[in-house]
Amino acid sequence: MKNMLAEFKDFINKGSLVDLAIAFIMALFFAPIITAIVDGVIMNLIAALFGKPNFDSIHIDVGDAELLIGTVITAIVQFLIVAFVCFLIVKQVNKMQGPEEEEDAGPTEVELLTQIRDSLRSGTA
């Protein structure tokens, strides 16, 4: 039981889990900002251009049924807008962080084996 608690503590304290939790919380509170931009600005621009606030009024009547094609188009447009805004944000964050420094990976496995072989041959092992 004690071992299981230690494992659970290690699991909870892993950086990736904490990073994921923080990312989830940030996304949860960032969503209203994106919604406000999409609904309050961009969809209003679409309304100014096309005369309607969204494409929901586009539909096809098939007998007694109605296919809401405009609702799908509106959802696709909103998704593309959100994806583009996220792309711009990630691009700016990456630019602010600067280029990643390459870490010295050290010798490869083949290089290590070659060094061992040469050391054994010369008798300095």
Image (cartoon, grey):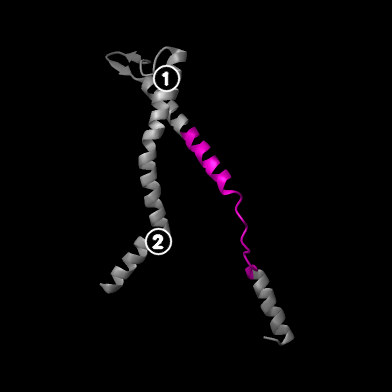
Front residue of 7/47: it is 47
- Amino acid type at mark 1: Asn
Please indicate whether residue 108 sits to the left or right of residue 47 in the image.
right
The answer to whether 22 is drawn above or below residue 85 in the figure is: below
Residue that numbered label 1 is attached to? 44
- Residue at 72% x, 84% y is 121
For badge 2, the amino acid type reads Lys
Task: Give the spatial CA distance, label 1 vs label 2.
Answer: 44 Å
Magenta span of residues:
83-109
In-front residue for pair 64/110: 110
Classify mark 1: helix, strand or loop. helix
Q: Report the mark closest to the observer, 1 or 2.
A: 1
Which residue sits at x=42%, y=22%?
A: 43
Locate residue 6, reporting x and y percent: 32, 70
Residue 101, x across and y down, in percent: 62, 56
In this view, the residue farthest toward the front is 96
As rendered, which of 62 and 125 lies closer to the eye? 125
Q: Which corner quadrant holds the N terminus?
A: bottom left
Q: Secondary structure at mark 2?
A: loop
Crowd around label 2: few <14 · some 14–19 · many ≥20 (10 Å):
few
Mark 1, residues whose alpha carbon is within 10 Å: few (<14), some, or many (≥20)? some
Quarter location, residue 55: top left
In this orientation, which residue lies closer to the viewer: 110 or 82? 82
**Left of 62 or right of it: where is 43?**
right
- The residue that mark 2 highlights is 14
Whether the magenta-drawn stretch holds residue 21 is answered as no
Residue at the image position 71 percent from the left and 87 percent from the top? 123
Which residue is farthest left?
Answer: 1
| Residue drawn where x is 42% and y is 29% of the image | 37
Among numbered discs 1 and 2, the one appearing first in the sequence = 2
- All told, the count of numbered labels is 2
